[in-house]
Image (tube, rainbow, N blue to C red):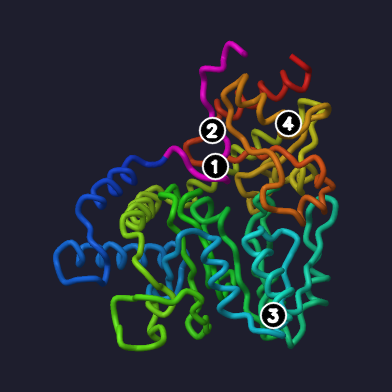
Amino acid sequence: MHPQSRRRVYLNCAATSVVRPPCVTEEVVRALGSLGSSGRGAGGRELGAARAVMVARERVCRLFNGARPERVIMCANATMALNLAILGTVRPGDHVVATAWDHNSVLRPLFALRDERGVNLDVVGADERGALDLDELARLVTPGTRLVTCTHASNLTGDVCDVAAVARIAHGAGALLLVDCAQTAGARPVDMQALGADLLAFTGHKALMAPQGTGGLIARPGVEVMPTLRGGTGVRSFDERMPEAWPEHLEAGTLNAHGIAGLSAALAWLDDLGVERVHHHDLALVRRFAKGVRSLGGCTLYGGLPRDLALLDGSLPGRDHAPVLALNVGGWESSALALALEERYGISVRAGAHCAPLMHRALGTSRTGAVRFSFGWFTSDQDVDYALDALGRLARGA
């Protein structure tokens, strides 16, 4: 065991946040002892829960520049939000276009619709660097396309998609655009209206640093989404169908008011800090790590970043990247490398396929997988340098 193994460095922020602002934990603890069930009574605890949920909707709407708070649907995670969007908009026989960047939270619902309900599915490919072919997207999207799915930033390479360009293609054919912001919500400014997203899914527990079990779906006014979960809403109990009014239209069952209170606290903290500040911090860490990896030798860094010198040296500030990078080291299996980083150096990363099978096929890493490093607001330059030193030692066989 390496003598520095007592040090703990968490570089798996793309999986979940571990270090959070203290106010988030404090608010969850407070909520656990004070909030009742939103919409299930007129007492102080129930009204307190309803107020907490309402404030959280307003803060989510403001963060993403949504049109109306009532179009914010509270979910357990981005997976639930993506399923609500896909299953609630796509009908048997519809045509859907997905991309190689998409997570299994998008792909598996679509594959099921293709196999079980006759949905026509096309997938836009990526090249050996993971770049999407937008010309292919333009060819595949037709006036009969119902939905286009788009991942804002790859959860494997951290490359950022030109969502606005995708939106122009989708809307030009009359299709809806669903954007998966799991890796960008809280890590960079996300303006739903500027991007052209009709539906936007996010999770709370990653860069937003909220509790697990929080997230949501935001729908543009006028976009119809049929309920896929049905049950109690606390209102219109004699109706046989879910209420037409939003958000109750898509929110069945008791909401996670305690987690939502934590999400609301995280959003308020982030609003005070400034998302743009987080973005600059993360981008500096990406540059520092990528430059360090390039200097090590024996390491393969995936995605567009290794060749994007303008982004690496900061000469084009408009260039963008999520705080996520994936690599392999010659002579190491990805799982063995991740284990060595954990056991010898106390560095937490993630190895494997990252629920991104089509991206791994494009990169040629289906058999080997890759080791993903991901950063957050509480990651320091010293953490990055320590990880680079550990990688260098392991690459040299030390």
Residue type, numbered disc 1: Cys
Residue 118 placement (x, y as % from top left): 73, 81
In the image, taking residue 364 as reference, residue 81 lies left or right, namely left
Magenta span contains residue 3: yes
Residue type, numbered disc 2: Tyr
Q: Which mark, by number, is residue 293?
A: 4
Which residue occupies 52% across, 64% down? 80
Residue 245 placement (x, y as % from top left): 38, 84
Counting residues from the start of the chain, the first of labels 1 and 3 encountered is: 1
Q: Which residue is mark 3?
A: 117
SS for tag 2? Answer: strand
Labelled pair 4, 1 in contact (Cβ < 8 Å): no
| Quarter residue 313 falls in | top right
- Observer-side mark, 2 or 3, equals 3
Question: Residue most toward the left?
Answer: 43
Q: Which mark, by number, is residue 13?
A: 1
Distance from label 1 to label 3 (Cα)?
36 Å
Q: Is residue 80 above or below residue 280?
A: below
Q: Which mark, by number, is residue 357?
A: none
Tell me if mark 2 has few (under 14), some (14-19) or many (20+) residues whose alpha carbon lies within 10 angstroms of its own: many
Residue 182 placement (x, y as % from top left): 56, 56
Distance from label 4 to label 1 (Cα)?
19 Å
Q: Report the span colored magenta.
A: 1-19
Secondary structure predominantly adopted by residues drawn in magenta: loop
Q: Which residue is mark 2?
A: 10
Residue type, numbered disc 4: Val
**In which quadrant of the rendered image does the N terminus lie?**
top right
